[in-house]
Image (cartoon, rainbow, N blue to C red):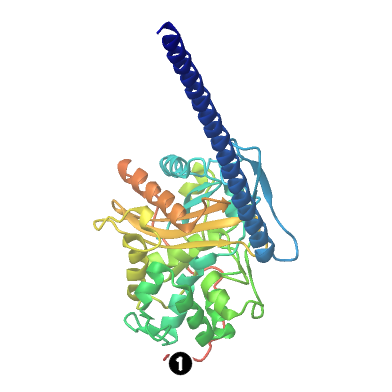
Amino acid sequence: MIGLCRLRAINLILAALLAVNAFGATRKHKRRHAAASTKTTKVVKRTRAARRTTARRTHVAATTTHGVIHTRVRYSSRRHRKIYSPWTEPTFADSTVGDVTAGDDPVVRKAAVDALGPYNGSVVVVNPETGRILSVVNQKLALAGAYQPCSTVKIMVSFASLSEGLVDVNTPVHLSRRSSVTLTQAIARSNNAYFAKMGEELGFDRVEHYAKLFGLGEKAGYEIPGEKAGTLAATTPSEGVGMMTSFGSGIRLTPLELASIVSTVANGGTMYYLQYPQSKAQLEDFQPRIKRSLDIADLVPSVRPGMMGAVEYGTARRANFNPDEPIFGKTGTCTDTVNPGVHLGWFGSFSQVGKSKVVVVVLLTGGRGVSGPVASGIAGQVYRNLATQNFVVQETEQTTAPVGLIALPALPTFAGTLP
């Protein structure tokens, strides 16, 4: 009986030992399986990351002009791997460095600097009724930084198309079998196909004519030290006239020139020389100087709904639409064709701030995160900052006789038809 009990005890001990060994083997197998699964996941992630990097490199090589690959390398904080960017210009910088603020209205200056924040760019604020520059943030960029205008060129193209009778504000232009767009919709949503078609219908000669009327390729200011003019192509750009009228190919524009164009639209057709008084004495002697008068007063009501629509429901929604004091503007986003390392975000606009009409132009230069919609948000903040300060323009409204009026040869009107 005692031997039988011992035998049963030994069997129980052996069974327990086998169970423990089996449990340990199972846990070891699970650990090995988990390790193998983690290793496989890491390999897959590295493979996917390599594919994305290769795709980015291929995209950069495919979109770069002049046979040069412009890349900027940065390192991820999580993984020590290189991330390539096609843009070399920094998105963020202190844009106030080197500015001389003696000629700036202090209230406007603060409103513009606070709105621009850390972005690398420029803000120009102008009184469109006189041409006086109220403030310039990043003066070097504003006066001499000529870049591709991107979609802001569509302001000029809109007036050219209306003036030549190609469209009116309600004309639906068919872009495909099932899509048609009006001028208001095209401006608000910055429809490239629409404005490329307008350019092809206008032809290069007429596009050049209206571009010169709106001051492209010439200085916008009157005796402003350091100002340089943008450029205008003398012949059809290699990309074609459609790219010229939708993306601004063949044109180099400064923020000051865009401020002049928008001011002319804001006041109904009077293009003033922009002036930048730098002392109290110069401000007291300030007199507006007319550069030329454009016969666009009857056309402005056809363009304004699209510029307002851009803020209400289009590409400039970040400016924040206010029906009581609407902002009228046009965005522009593209990578500069001459310098592919610079991505651009434009916004040219005007609005009523209290009793004063004000023009605000924003140009952002950088890489990821730079766009026309972002620029519109900065401009909208400038207007709100001014409104909270109850800003009112103080200078005289007296005008002089036209100075330096440029006479351009008249071109025959083009009675074009669109399908």
Q: Is residue 49 visible?
A: yes
Structural crowding at the residue carrying mark 1, measured as other residues with C-alpha within 10 Å and reported as few (<14), some (14–19) or many (≥20): few
Farthest-out residue, top: 2
Residue at left offset 66%, top offset 42%? 81
Residue 277 x, y percent position in the rendering: 52, 49
Image mark count: 1
Q: Is residue 227 visible?
A: no
Residue 334 x, y percent position in the rendering: 55, 62
Residue at left offset 40%, top offset 62%? 315
Residue at left offset 58%, top offset 56%? 343
Residue 229 x, y percent position in the rendering: 63, 63
**Type of the residue with mark 1:** Gly
Farthest-out residue, left: 324
**Quick one: SS at disc 1?**
loop
Mark 1, residue position = 416
Q: Nearer the viewer, residue 31 or 276?
A: 31
Tell whether 356 sits left or right of 223: left
Q: Is residue 197 above or below residue 403?
A: below
Residue 348 x, y percent position in the rendering: 45, 60
Work out which quarter of the rendered image holds the C terminus and state it: bottom left
Tell whether 67 sits left or right of 212: right
Q: Is residue 135 above or below residue 237?
A: above
Q: Nearer the viewer, residue 47 or 27?
A: 27
Q: Nearer the viewer, residue 50 or 127?
A: 50
Work out which quarter of the rendered image holds the N terminus and state it: top left
